[in-house]
Image (cartoon, grey):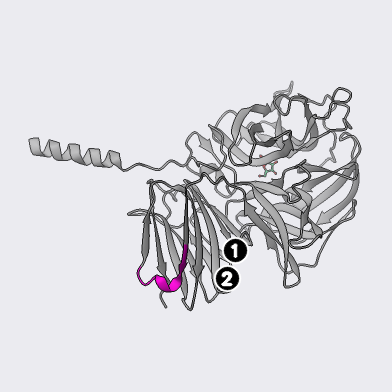
Amino acid sequence: MQKLVTFLAVVCLLNACIPSATYRPAYHYTPEKNWVNDPNGLVYLDGEYHLFYQYNPAGDKWGHMSWGHAVSKNLKTWEELPLAIPETMNADGSTNMVFSGAAVVDSLNTSGFFEKGFTKGMVAIYTSHLNKNGEGMAQSQSLAYSSDKGRTWKFYDKNPVLAIGLKDFRDPNVFMQEGKWKMIVAKPLEFMVQIYESTNLKEWTLLSEFGKMGDVAKIWECPSLFKVPVENSDNSKWVMLVSSAAEATEFTGMQYFVGEFDGKSFVSDKQEGVLRLDRGKDFYAAIPFQNLPSKDKNPIIMGWGSNWSYAGDIPSEGRRGMFSMPRKLSLVKENGQFRLVQKPIYSNRIHSKELKLKASELTKPKTWEMKNNSYKLGLVIDLGNSNGFAMELLKNEEEKCVLTYNAMTQKLFFDRTKSGKIDFNKNFTSIETMQAVPQNGVLKLDIFVDNSIVEVFANEGEAVLTDLVFPQKNGGKIILSLLKD
Ligand code: FRU
């Protein structure tokens, strides 16, 4: 009996020593508690980057949509601030939810919301979503303004400023061009965006429409339009981001168009197929920061790390959802077509492992023991005449994520079918694929593993893949081996 008790005590102690995983990311932003989706009102002002976002102050499920708020001085670490713009209740019990939108700095006080000469007024342009008994009744564009750098907000007393009688009409993104405000906003069910102009943010004139191109499988949401520099040249082109369907159309994903914008209409270059921003399942609703310091010519975007196909079911720790790392954008021309390149912005304080090797050195699999599930892994691999490689990540007795590179097809696969908790939604298990062409036989991967999110950047951001994963133990291994014939 005594022996049995001792044995059981030892087993319990050992079990307690195996740390279970936390899903809260260490260097991706997520608020302390509750539900988040889209980033909203990304804007820079006076040394602070503002991240507003779709937030439910009342729980870890979608609802009561309001704007949450965080700020950062460096785009690497974030501080959560109190709720910025709340859902409001109408006399009849219906509510106005505060859906996605943009924030701008109205330095010339074009709106008249601020005191004379005040240059630091912030205006939020968002979608009012009228919600009656849990049902969406109408969507229109509204304003709120802040004189204290986004800490407190007032609603414009003549909201809404733009309504066209459509029930689905949302997600305005606003920027200044040659002294005039431009708004791009989605008609989601028609796969269209509209572009408007205004001198005061209050009265808007329709300039043009664009759409029914590229991916039209599901819906169009959260559009944005901005200039992106072409690498190694003085040129830039206009890029339109649209949140729509993924290649597997039961999932949401992002596409983009490259073209020209003459101040009135956007015209897309001819493109072959759909240009996709991210080849994983968990990058959506990304928009650019407004009002970046003029030395920063390259736009910076952030996205929501989840997918509407299962977002409501992912494991909750009293909070659900997170944001991608910020990504700096540029364009390159490849086979006559422009493509976006995305470079992650991250802190060099993240624990990082840099591996530089030749495939021929991998006669036996190599293993690395990791202390926890949050790190950056840099891999520069000379493929030689190998068939490619397989890298197991977050590997423990029962679980692993597998990144496989096939040198023949030049395709990278990310397999999360055994990645940990997967049974919360039947759509979650998946294998992603992305093309990654080695340069002079060398493939470069920057892999960001952060407890429940993995972002893979190939060849300095030429191809990107973002996926959520839910390993149930901390400190998984990395095992790298050659692909057999
Ligand atoms: C996109 C979206 C937006 C909408 C918001 C509501 O993820 O559906 O179109 O404004 O989420 O939370």
**Residue 476 rendering spot, x and y as whole percentages:** 38, 51
Q: Is residue 142 visible?
A: yes
Disc number placed over residue 438 in the picture, else none: 2
Q: Amino acid at mark 1?
A: Asn
CA distance for labels 2 and 1: 8 Å
Question: Which quarter of the image is occupied by the N terminus?
Answer: top left
Circle 1: element type: loop
Q: Amino acid at mark 2?
A: Pro
Q: Which residue range is magenta in the image?
A: 356-364
Q: Nearer the viewer, residue 6 or 156?
A: 6
Question: Could you say which quadrant of the image residue 73 lies in?
Answer: top right
Question: Which quarter of the image is occupied by the C terminus?
Answer: bottom left
Q: Nearer the viewer, residue 131 or 478?
A: 478
What residue is shown at x 46% (from left), y 70% (from top)? 358
Which residue position is annotated with label 1? 459
Q: Nearer the viewer, residue 217 or 362?
A: 362
